[in-house]
Image (cartoon, rainbow, N blue to C red):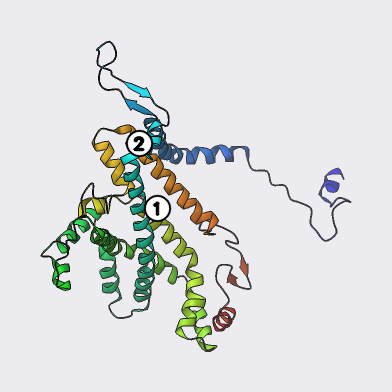
Amino acid sequence: MPALAARTPSATQPPGKAPPVLRHRPSGTNRLAALLISPTIAVLGLVVGYPVVAAVRESLYTKNSGLDSSGFVRTGEQFVGLQHYSDLFQGEAGDRFWNAFTNTTLFTVTTVLIETVLGVVMALVMHKVVRGRALVRATILVPWAIPTVVSALLWQWIFQADGVANALLGGQVLWTTDGFQAALAVIIADTWKTAPFVGLLVLAGLQLIPTEVYEAARVDGANAWHQFTRITLPLLRPVLLVAILFRLLDALRMFDLPYVLIGARKDSVETLSMLAFDEAANTRYGPAAAYAVLLFLYVAAAAFIFVKILGADVFSTKNDGKTSGGHRSGLPRPRSAAKEALV
């Protein structure tokens, strides 16, 4: 009787509700889960955590050089605190930092915006084409498969004084020298290289949209533009956000393309990554680490703003696996989507 009474609803339980079910996880499950993920955590700590901590520490120290008051050569390191960070915002170093910051932001905004538009167009073409689909997809994806350094050398040949670009324009534009044309050359080369990546992700999203949605929209009289703006784009939103986020984080770290295509210490194309590399190449490891830490904070802040403040809930798992009336929660009902397309 006591066991039977323990299973019956209590007197305080609201009517119509089943008593709460207490599920006790086996004691060894947590230990097994921690054991299984421990190699991943160890690898991440080694390849991600340690370099970040090492860079922060390096930015707080400086290498001793010269002679001390006794005439001996100074060796080792000296703690300088935030001196390297304060020096980056003053004088010539400050001008160079803000120039690199502006170039990095400009390249990120322009390339990500253009690549998103072109990527959607490429995905629509690859999704709609019937004849020669494999050839079209391979042709579009070839630029993304080419290594960035090889792509930069290819565009350097195109943008040289007697290259293809000037032959098509009928002029003599010095693309690979310092100036606005150099920044434009970097934007063109980066767009050609990475727009197929956005197109590949968007294509995967297009293939998940059921054809019944478009059929219902056509039956209700929705034209192609309404189908694209009211059905395709809303359903592609999670995929687009992921693609934009990936490209945003990658563009903020741009280094090899402008470095090979235009060259080092060019004010019009110098990015924060190039600035940190230049400082390290001249054995100024403290300022180089400070630049790297600031770039890391910039990338982290951009990702946080994109994901949280702009509402880009790209990692949400709400309603995953739930069904309603035979339809997955992430997909609209064909008739309701068609009606929305006509609104």
Disc 1 versus disc 2: distance between alpha carbons?
19 Å
Q: Residue 282 location, x and y as percent?
A: 24, 35
Q: Is residue 269 left or right of residue 295?
A: left
Residue 175, quarter of picture: bottom left
Determine the secondary structure under disc 1.
helix
> Seen from this angle, which residue lies furthest top?
70
Q: Which residue is mark 1?
A: 249
Residue in the image at 25% along x and 55% along y: 148
> In the visual, does 267 lie left or right of 336?
left
Rendered location of residue 35, percent (x, y): 50, 37
Q: In terms of depth relative to the viewer, which is nearer, 200 or 105?
A: 105
Disc ID at residue 289: 2
Q: Is residue 51 above or below residue 210?
A: above
Q: Secondary structure at mark 2?
A: helix
Residue 295 visible in rendering = yes
Residue 69: x %, y % from top left: 29, 13
Residue 184, by quadrant, is: bottom left
Can you say which quadrant of the picture contains the C terminus?
bottom right
Q: Nearer the viewer, residue 128 or 89?
A: 89
161 lies above or below 279: below
Residue drawn at point x = 46 percent, y = 52 percent = 303
Callout 2 crowding tier (Cα within 10 Å): few <14, some 14–19, many ≥20: many
Given the image, on which type of amino acid does mark 1 rest? Leu
Quarter of the rendering occupied by the N terminus: top right
The amino acid type of the residue labelled 2 equals Ala
Q: Residues within 10 Å of mark 1 (few under 14, many from 20)?
A: some
Q: Residue 258 at x, y = what percent? A: 25, 53
Question: In front: 202, or 34?
Answer: 202
Q: Quadrant of residue 125?
A: bottom left
**Which dot, 1 or 2, sits closer to the camera?**
2
